[in-house]
Amino acid sequence: MELFNEGQVIFYAEDKQLKKAGVFFNPKREFDRDLNVLVVSSLISNKSAGLELFSGSGIRGLRLCIESNKFNKFTFNDIKSYDTVKRNLELNKKRLLSTDKTVNNTDATLFESSSKYDYIDIDPFGSPVFYLDSALNLLKRGGVLAVSATDTAALLGSAQKACLRKYGSVSLKTSYSNELGIRILIKKVIEYGLNHSINLVPILFNFEGNFIRVYFKADPSKIKPSIGYAYQCYKCPNRVTKALLKCDYCGGRMHKIGPMWLGSLHNEKYLNKMISSLKKNRMKFSDKASLKLMNYLNAVLSELPVFSYYTTSEISSFLKQPEIKISKFKNRTVLSPKGFRTKNSFSNLIATLDSKQSE
Ligand SMILES: C[S@@+](CC[C@H](N)C(=O)[O-])C[C@H]1O[C@@H](n2cnc3c(N)ncnc32)[C@H](O)[C@@H]1O
Ligand SMILES: [Zn+2]
């Protein structure tokens, strides 16, 4: 066991990032936990109740309690690391005086409680779908649900059968598969919410290689969920969200993907709240962390509200040209360093690029 420090917390953990490690801790997720602190600080009321179903070392829950100062009650649960979480709470006890803490070691699928929570966190190994019922049984109206998934082979289209089995959707390996994964995950969580009569609105996502995390707010107002399909041409990069049997650019057959969430991947109102909390920085982020968060939120906010992005590689190779520089495109995406979004149809995009090329 090693002693670590992240944000304003010191804690014991094993830096192994392996399933078989005694106490899981992944130092590479620091930005994700910074973002988590910011989401909670901005969206949760004072004196709230929080539940972390997969605590690992407890670092995430500890940071949420100490840095956001929003919880007067917090439950840490992990099937494996009960003693370490207890030890880490003791280590940070002076900063946790205003929080009533409970530590559990229940299997998250069976987790029950007599009271409900304003914030619930699902951060398992693999897919979160098996734990959504436990969480949604306990989520208060107006509460925030955080859901992580690391089963990216399924969500991003490499393991299509697994995706169909777990998420009820067809995914596909494409240049924008991470967006498909996020949209399929959102659809599944929203569907579970509806089974529990909870309307879940996606607020913000974070994608880091083999890790997807999405925040939802249980919104009491009824908004019609925007769930549907996308159609990707087998022969060219064209993709659309209206049903097409044949590509309207090259006539190729279309591959039907989904069902998935087709609405916005972020919520402008809540992102603006996060930006204004960050400007006040009551969470005491370092300058470096603060700048990274601000850049990320501004980049997400400025993304064009369209389905999927193209990459410069796929477009250049389709046009059989040397790679076009990404700096030529205004509407970038946080989902790929070579990705850009456009409101143009594929035909118009190609026409515009061709005319620029011939100038
Ligand atoms: C990805 S780690 C959690 C990381 C932590 N949230 C963080 O940010 O550092 C997943 C954790 O889930 C725990 N776990 C695995 N299966 C579980 C189950 N069925 N119920 C509760 N905990 C479980 C593991 O012991 C592991 O600590
Ligand atoms: Zn085509």
Image (cartoon, grey):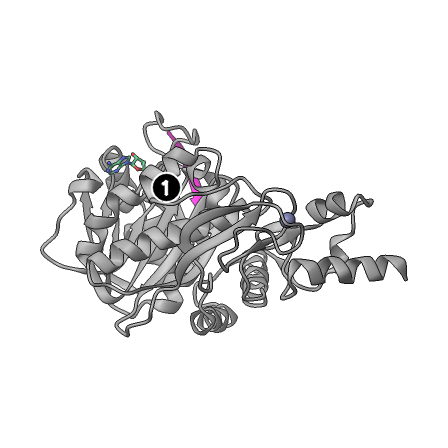
Res. 130 image quadrant: top left
* Residue 49 pos. (x, y %): 22, 61
* Residue 253 pos. (x, y %): 57, 45
User: Magenta stretch: dominant SS?
Assistant: strand
- Confirm whether residue 57 shows in the render: no
Front residue of this view, candidates 341 and 65: 341
Residue 240 within the magenta-colored segment of the rendering: no
Could you tell me which quadrant the N terminus lies in?
Answer: top left
Front residue of this view, candidates 242 and 120: 242
Disc 1 residue: CB within 8 Å of ligand 1: no
Count up the numbered dots: 1
When the figure is inspected, residue 5 is found, relative to residue 287, above or below; the finding is above
Could you tell me which quadrant the C terminus lies in?
Answer: bottom right
Res. 167 image quadrant: top left
Residues rendered magenta in the picture: 1-6
> Which residue is at 36% across, 54% downward?
187
In this image, 121 relative to 310: left or right? left
When the figure is inspected, residue 339 is found, relative to residue 78, above or below; the finding is below
* Residue 180 pos. (x, y %): 48, 49
- Confirm whether residue 300 shows in the render: yes
Label 1 sits on residue: 11
Q: For mark 1, does the 10 Å Cα neighbourhood hold few (<14), some (14 to 19), or many (20 or more) residues?
A: many
Residue 2 within the magenta-colored segment of the rendering: yes
> Which residue is at 64% across, 42% downward?
235
